[in-house]
Image: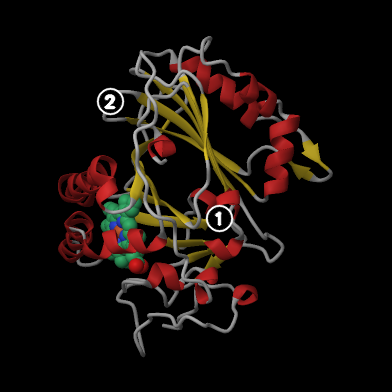
């Protein structure tokens, strides 16, 4: 098997920090990375969320509102301004609130900024008044340059997330299934240790009704690490599906609950284990989930995945799962990781409860 390196040629530089790839390494199974055109220098991932005290059906208006902007058909020259890809996901959080979010991706910050203005999103967002809104709103946007972004896919065929904008696929890649491989796929990590800021977690201020009565912008943090790690068992045959639901899903859920409830022990500010949902029916009718987590730095994310019993249970569970299926696996796994500078992050919360997203971070 000819293996290729996950870092695209135009982003390769002389390493001042060696990769951790073992000598003469051959991964036990193949994996792939998304390839983007050379002229794509950055991308945008936006999480646009609405928060309700419970799931009641009132979400419909919020979804339609956000969709009215996402489907804006304006253009800038030849380029469409609406997101290159978007989908909806939902999670009920530990306070019982139902959070429904659009995940939307653009090929550049410039296109995103033009979309915010021309679609009317920006003026609508700025005009939101916590006194008048029945639900909370949150906006979490990341603007990584391509050297601060990496992906790994178990399948080279079906894209997910930002890879919906891919130009092609690279692989099978060399950098995977050994600890440290995520860092080795990040171009910036050739020369940068990507240290973060001290982990500071404090409950945000409380309003009498438990919701924050005003709009809060949380400042960005140096080298915040974002992971979206997805699972798709839609195409599994009955035997594999049963095994996934019975053995993998529970350990995955336990890992995500740990990061959500005790993330402060491992440098994780926020973790949402989300179902991809149909925006019309709001039912999780697609067999796809993902964990979306924000860590104070890449090293904390690495440490949790390498050492913590909850990810080790996921990892160990997967090896058993693969063995039981004689390594013929239809389950698809992917992740995308972004390590962003403070100015490459935007966190704004309007009338959300104090444990939402980065509100917990001082
Ligand atoms: C690495 C399994 C979910 C975080 C790995 C690896 C496996 C694995 C086999 C090593 C593979 C490689 O590098 O190619 C799984 C399975 C999951 C799952 C089967 C779900 C069914 C998650 C989730 C997160 C996560 C939800 C975080 C939100 C990581 C990280 C690494 C990793 C950060 C890379 C470690 C490094 O390269 O240093 N996982 N995982 N995983 N996993 Fe998971």
2 lies above or below 161: below
Residue 354 percent location from the top left of the image = 37, 28
Q: Residues within 10 Å of mark 1 (few under 14, many from 20)?
A: many
Residue 180 in view (yes/no): yes
Q: Is residue 241 left or right of residue 297?
A: left
Residue 282, by quadrant, is top left
Q: Quadrant of residue 119?
A: top right
Residue occupied by mark 2: 95
Percent coordinates x, y for residue 281 in the rendering:
41, 22
| Earlier-in-chain disc, 2 versus 1 | 2
Q: How many dots with numbers?
A: 2
The answer to whether residue 20 is left or right of residue 256 is: right
Q: Which residue is mark 1?
A: 341
Point 49% across, 79% down: residue: 4
Depth order, front residue of 137/249? 137
Quarter of the image for the C terminus: give it: top left
What is the image's colouring?
secondary structure
Residue 330: tell me if it is visible. no
Q: Is disc 2 placed on a helix, strand or loop?
A: loop
Residue name at image x 61 percent, y 77 percent = 9
Q: CA distance from mark 2 to mark 1?
A: 30 Å
Judge whether 324 appears above or below 122 on screen: below
- Secondary structure type for disc 1: loop
Q: Give neighbour class at mark 2: few <14, some 14-19, many 20+ (Cα, 10 Å).
A: few
Residue at the limit of the structure toward the bottom, as seen here: 24
| Residue 356 x, y percent position in the rendering | 39, 32
> Can you tell me which quadrant of the image ligand 1 is in?
bottom left
Between circles 2 and 1, the one closer to the viewer is 1
Q: Nearer the viewer, residue 92 or 357?
A: 357
Looking at the picture, how far across and down is residue 17, in whole percent? 47, 80
Residue at 46% x, 21% y: name it: 351
The answer to whether the beta carbon of the residue marked 1 is less than 8 Å from any atom of ligand 1 is no
């Amino acid at each position: 098997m000819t293996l290729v390196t996950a870092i695209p040629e135009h982003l390769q530089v002389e390493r001042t920090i060696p990769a951790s790839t073992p000598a003469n390494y051959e991964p036990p199974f193949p994996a792939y990375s998304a390839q983007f055109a050379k002229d794509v220098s950055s991308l945008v991932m936006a999480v646009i969320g609405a928060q309700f005290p419970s799931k009641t059906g009132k979400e419909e208006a919020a979804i339609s509102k956000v969709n009215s902007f996402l489907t804006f058909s304006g253009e800038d020259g030849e380029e469409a301004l609406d997101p290159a890809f978007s989908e909806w996901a939902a999670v009920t959080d530990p306070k019982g609130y139902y959070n429904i979010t659009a995940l939307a991706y653009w090929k550049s910050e410039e296109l995103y900024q033009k979309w915010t203005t021309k679609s009317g999103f920006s003026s609508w967002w700025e005009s939101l008044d916590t006194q008048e809104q029945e639900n909370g709103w949150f906006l979490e946007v990341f603007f990584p340059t391509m050297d601060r972004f990496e992906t790994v896919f178990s399948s080279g065929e079906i894209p997910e997330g930002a890879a919906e904008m891919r130009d092609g696929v690279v692989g099978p890649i060399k950098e995977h299934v050994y600890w440290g491989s995520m860092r080795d796929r990040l171009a910036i990590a050739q020369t940068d240790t990507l240290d973060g800021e001290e982990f500071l977690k404090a409950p945000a201020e409380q309003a009498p009704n438990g919701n924050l009565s005003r709009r809060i912008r949380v400042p960005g943090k140096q080298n915040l690490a974002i992971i979206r790690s997805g699972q798709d068992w839609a195409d599994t045959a009955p035997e594999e599906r049963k095994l996934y639901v019975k053995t993998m899903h529970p350990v995955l859920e336990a890992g995500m609950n740990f990061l959500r409830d005790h993330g402060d022990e491992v440098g994780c500010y926020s973790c949402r284990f989300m179902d991809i949902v149909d925006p019309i029916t709001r039912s999780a009718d697609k067999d796809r989930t993902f964990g979306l987590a924000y860590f104070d730095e890449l090293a904390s994310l690495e440490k949790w995945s390498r050492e913590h019993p909850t990810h080790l249970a996921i990892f160990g569970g997967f090896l058993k799962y693969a063995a039981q299926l004689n390594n013929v696996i239809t389950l698809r796994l992917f992740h995308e990781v972004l390590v962003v500078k403070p100015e490459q992050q935007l966190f704004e919360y309007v009338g959300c409860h104090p444990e939402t997203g980065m509100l917990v971070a001082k």
